[in-house]
């Protein structure tokens, strides 16, 4: 049995030393709970690097879903088109939650080298080309189905599928998307690294994707990046201390690292999610499976200590609540909750398949019966549940030294 959920606590000393608190007060629910039936956003339904050559454009298939082939098995979730659209929807949800903020680290002097760890479809890296100077090199790093990305251009990527994901601004006049080259880019080029190549074929001129594993030793020079960013890695990373250490080693003195993670254990402010609720039990099963393969789903609530242990200073934490469903009264949170509910429903089968069958030993029949019950619980408008999302960043000292 997995360990019970422990609600994250805010250390008063951390708050006194600059820990940032965002929207963590109780979310007010609508007086009349109704499932609005919105369906417009979806339905249930030792270090190695190589370029995006045809030899690595390979996948494995199981139970009708596609998985990454590079270092097969380390990431137990799919990377097919449905999952990619869900990744883009998660980006839209976070942009709605934060008001379009791509990062909270106070990056000064216009960064020239930016690394995106676990870039996924590359959407954060591509969107951030509008926020950083044209001369900046952005590198996207991915651990499983994500990728490394380096971007400084102003082109808009070719859209994939029928969901038009938002971008921060229109392309600069005269710029056009260009295809990813088939050969290995030179060391000076921006790169994206991923375990499975799922990124768009048309990307900004300074974006490159590279198949790599961010938990192996990084191939980049020490003190190389101005900013290291990562998001939605909680179910992929097995060694957060090593990841933070590598982030520290490869960021320049005075540079920043920031990780943005959802703690995927639901809570409620008004006791509408009892301890034995179906949704709580669902995450207990998932936590048990992830624990068996070495993934700590509680890691987001420990990011502050991981940053400090790695040596970062001025570590700050910003915490938001993400509602599940359209029950909040606040219109913005209602939209965030709609995005998150759609994301959960669309991803439920893919998220559950391998953890429950390959790891916990369930049959497909048992899983489908269970997921029917979970879907019913997700749609229940009387349950006012939410997730915590942590935005944690820290600065590498000007005179770098390993923390205690």
Image (tube, rainbow, N blue to C red):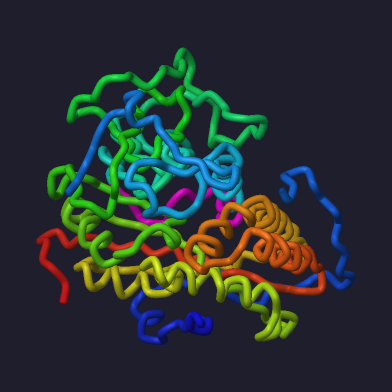
Residue nearest the observer in this picture, 401 or 19: 401
Chain part drawn in magenta: 94-108
Residue nearest the observer in this picture, 288 or 52: 288
Residue 188 image position (x, y, % from top left): 19, 29
Residue 397 image position (x, y, % from top left): 17, 62
Residue nearest the observer in this picture, 125 or 352: 352
Residue 127 image position (x, y, % from top left): 47, 37
Residue found at x 23% / y 73%? 309
Question: Does residue 238 appear anywhere in the picture?
Answer: yes
Horizontal side of residue 277 vs 391, given as left or right:
right
Main SS class of the magenta portion in the image: loop
Residue found at x 26% / y 67%? 241
Question: Based on the displayed image, in which of its 4 quarters is residue 60 positioned?
Answer: top left
Q: Quadrant of the C terminus?
A: bottom left
Residue found at x 64% / y 70%? 386
Horizontal side of residue 40 vs 166, given as left or right:
right
Residue 4, above or below 33:
below
Residue found at x 75% / y 62%? 372
Residue 356 image position (x, y, % from top left): 55, 64
Asked whether residue 100 is drawn in magenta, I would say: yes
């Amino acid at each position: 049995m997995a360990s019970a959920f422990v609600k994250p606590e805010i250390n008063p000393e951390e708050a006194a030393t600059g820990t940032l608190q965002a929207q963590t007060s109780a979310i007010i629910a609508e007086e009349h709970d109704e499932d609005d039936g919105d369906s417009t956003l979806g339905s249930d339904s030792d270090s190695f690097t190589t370029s995006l050559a045809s030899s690595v454009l390979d996948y494995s298939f199981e139970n009708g879903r596609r998985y990454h082939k590079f270092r097969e098995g380390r990431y137990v979730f799919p990377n097919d088109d449905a999952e990619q659209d869900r990744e883009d929807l998660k980006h839209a949800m976070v942009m709605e939650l934060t008001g379009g903020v791509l990062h909270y680290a106070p990056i000064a002097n216009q960064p020239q080298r930016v690394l995106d760890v676990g870039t996924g479809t590359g959407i954060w890296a591509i969107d951030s080309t509008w926020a950083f100077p044209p001369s900046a090199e952005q590198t996207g790093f991915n651990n499983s189905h994500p990728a490394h990305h380096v971007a400084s251009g102003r082109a808009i990527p070719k859209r994939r599928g029928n969901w038009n994901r938002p971008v921060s601004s229109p392309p600069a006049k005269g710029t056009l998307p260009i295809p990813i080259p088939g050969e290995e880019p030179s060391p000076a080029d921006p790169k994206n690294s991923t375990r499975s190549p799922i990124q768009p074929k048309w990307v900004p001129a300074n974006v490159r994707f590279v198949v790599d594993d961010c938990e192996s030793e990084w191939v980049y020079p020490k003190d190389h990046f101005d900013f290291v960013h990562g998001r939605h890695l909680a179910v992929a990373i097995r060694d957060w201390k090593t990841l933070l250490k590598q982030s520290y080693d490869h960021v320049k003195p005075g540079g920043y690292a920031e990780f943005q993670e959802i703690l995927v254990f639901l809570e409620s402010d008004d006791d509408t999610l009892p301890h034995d609720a179906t949704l709580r039990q669902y995450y207990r099963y998932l936590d048990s499976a992830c624990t068996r393969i070495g993934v700590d789903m509680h890691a987001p609530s420990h990011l502050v200590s991981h940053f400090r242990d790695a040596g970062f200073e001025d570590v700050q934490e910003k915490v938001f609540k993400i509602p599940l469903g359209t029950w909040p009264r606040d219109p913005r949170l209602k939209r965030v909750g709609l995005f998150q509910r759609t994301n959960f429903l669309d991803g439920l089968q893919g998220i559950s398949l391998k953890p429950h069958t390959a790891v916990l030993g369930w049959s497909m029949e048992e899983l489908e019966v269970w997921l029917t019950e979970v879907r019913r619980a997700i749609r229940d408008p009387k349950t006012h549940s939410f997730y915590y999302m942590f935005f944690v960043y820290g600065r590498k000292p000007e005179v770098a030294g390993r923390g205690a």
